[in-house]
């Protein structure tokens, strides 16, 4: 991520935890697009899911998009979709088409 941010000449902020993320969001609230990467965290990680559920509370302007690899097995994709439906998903992005 750091390399891509450097190449694209865009700012990158790394949040250590959900509290740090909550502190960072106001600093980027004027931006048209803010990407939050969960860095391959498992949808089975309940702590991660609890933290993600809090994001819309932190900033009501968030649009949550689920990013899935098109190369993943169908069962893995449907499992991820089902687990992430606890979040207010606005859409989905398929990668590796």
Image (spheres, rainbow, N blue to C red):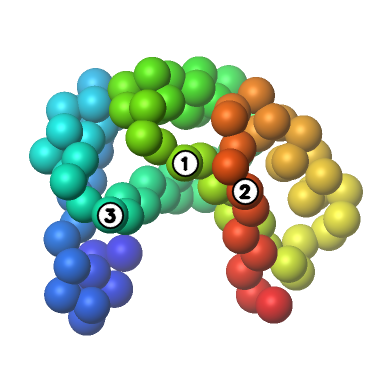
7 lies above or below 28? below
Which secondary structure, mark 3?
loop
Name the residue located 78 percent from the left edge and 50 percent from the top edge.
77
Name the residue located 65 percent from the left edge and 34 percent from the top edge.
84
Which secondary structure, mark 2?
strand
Name the residue located 24 percent from the left edge and 26 percent from the top edge.
22
Q: Mark 2 points at which residue?
A: 91
Name the residue located 73 percent from the left edge and 67 percent from the top edge.
70
Question: Is residue 3 something one can see in this rendering?
Answer: no
Real-space Cα separation, disc 3 to disc 2, in angstroms: 17 Å
Q: Mark 1 points at which residue?
A: 63
Task: Give the side of residue 31 with respect to residue 57, left or right.
Answer: left
Residue 58: % across, % down: 32, 22
Real-space Cα separation, disc 1 to disc 2, in angstroms: 8 Å
Q: Residue 83 carries which label?
A: none
Residue 5: % across, % down: 23, 69
Nearest the eye: 42 or 34: 34
Mark closest to the chain's N terminus, 1 or 3: 3
| Disc 2: CA contacts within 10 A as few (<14), some (14-19) or many (>=20) | few
């Amino acid at each position: 991520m750091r390399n891509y941010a450097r190449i694209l000449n865009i700012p990158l902020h790394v949040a250590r935890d959900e509290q740090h993320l909550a502190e960072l969001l106001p600093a980027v609230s004027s931006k048209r697009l803010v990407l939050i990467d969960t860095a391959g965290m498992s949808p089975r990680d309940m702590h991660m899911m609890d933290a993600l559920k809090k994001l819309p509370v932190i900033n009501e302007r968030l649009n949550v998009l689920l990013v899935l690899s098109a190369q993943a097995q169908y069962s893995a994709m449907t499992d991820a979709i089902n687990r992430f439906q606890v979040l207010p998903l606005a859409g989905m992005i398929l990668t590796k088409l």
